[in-house]
Amino acid sequence: MLDLSPEVIILVLVVIMALAFDFINGFHDTANAIATSVSTRALSPKTAIIIASLCNLIGALSYTGVAKTIGGSITDPFKLENGLIVVLAALTSAILWNLITWWFGIPSSSSHAIIGGVAGAAFGAAGSGAINWSGFISIIQALIVSPLVAFAVGFVVIKLVSWFVRNSAYHKTNKGFRSMQVLSAAWQAFSHGANDAQKTMGVITLALISGGFLIQQPGEFTIPLWVKLSAALAMALGTAFGGWRIIKTLGGKIMKIKPISGFSADLSSALIITIFTALKLPVSTTHVITSAILGVGASQKLNAVKWGLAGRILVTWVITLPITGLLAAACYVVFDVFL
């Protein structure tokens, strides 16, 4: 007979919430992979979303390093008490923040939201001692450094690409870079899935270990196959629904994007995300692609970028971690009373 103990019910709820977060992450962050290619008409919206969905799925199944970092570096799943409720509170906080920022069309970070949520919920459950500060700080450093590097790389790449085609006819250059954007958008989508879907895998595995449903040795953190498959599919399905509000912001409100600049931004951001994924470090794909676009725009002329909107986005980035952390801590207190 099926065991419907309170712990099992909470675990099922956690898994549903985690996959919901992954789905929302997919449509929230679809713009990261396809905004520039849609803006330059290199791809139709429908074709772009199909490519992004498939590449997200493949990318999500290709790595597990980031999942291990998310699940084991913020807090210790082997020592965390009430781990199921901690994860449930973290997911609730992250989903609420994602929906709020999606509604207003602001490309905030799902990565910041879930990382802030896990840290805040663990802190609310057991105080500062529940946080693995060295691991948490290394994650924050990656989140800060990656967009700065993406800005610099975008600035340099557009300069190099422009130099290589300096003697080419403008219409031929545009046609060529529109074709190349299909490849750069596909790589961008693959890298997005490879990094972002792993965060959900890590959170579900954290819940399984801390709740006693997955027996592993301390220090071991193996992602079950069903967790990898379900997270990858949820991300791909979410991507298929698209994120048109944010596509509009990234695809034209920050700067006017041409095929050469769209290709350069996609290439730069995909490269940075892939490198950090190989290093097993989570990054914000939203931060990286937006920073690459800003770097490309700034290399042409400073007034090509609408810095007022960029500043608004930056403020959202900065406040996401503390807001989701506080919200998750509050959610934990409430859930701990009623669950």
Image (spheres, helix red, strand yellow):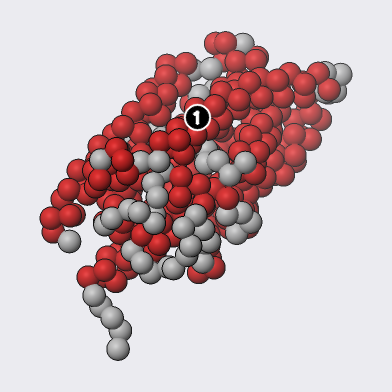
Which residue is drawn at the image coordinates 28% and 34% (left, top)? Answer: 323
Residue 263 lies in quadrant: top right
Which residue is drawn at the image coordinates 26% and 68% (left, top)? Answer: 7
Would you place residue 135 above or below residue 24 in this image? Answer: above
Which residue is drawn at the image coordinates 65% and 38% (left, top)? Answer: 275
Which residue is at the front of the view, 132 or 56? 132
Which residue is at the front of the view, 85 or 50? 85
Q: In this view, does 26 lie to the left or right of 338?
A: right
Which residue is drawn at the image coordinates 69% and 29% (left, top)? Answer: 264
The image position of residue 27, as x and y in percent, is 45, 49
Would you place residue 211 above or below residue 109 in this image? Answer: below
The image position of residue 189, as x and y in percent, is 60, 47
Total number of numbered labels? Answer: 1
Residue 140 in sight in this render? yes
Residue 47 in sight in this render? no
- Identity of the amino acid at label 1? Gln
Q: Is residue 67 left or right of residue 319?
A: right
Label 1 Cα crowd, 10 Å radius (few <14 / some 14-19 / many 20+) = few
Placement of the N terminus among the 4 image quadrants: bottom left
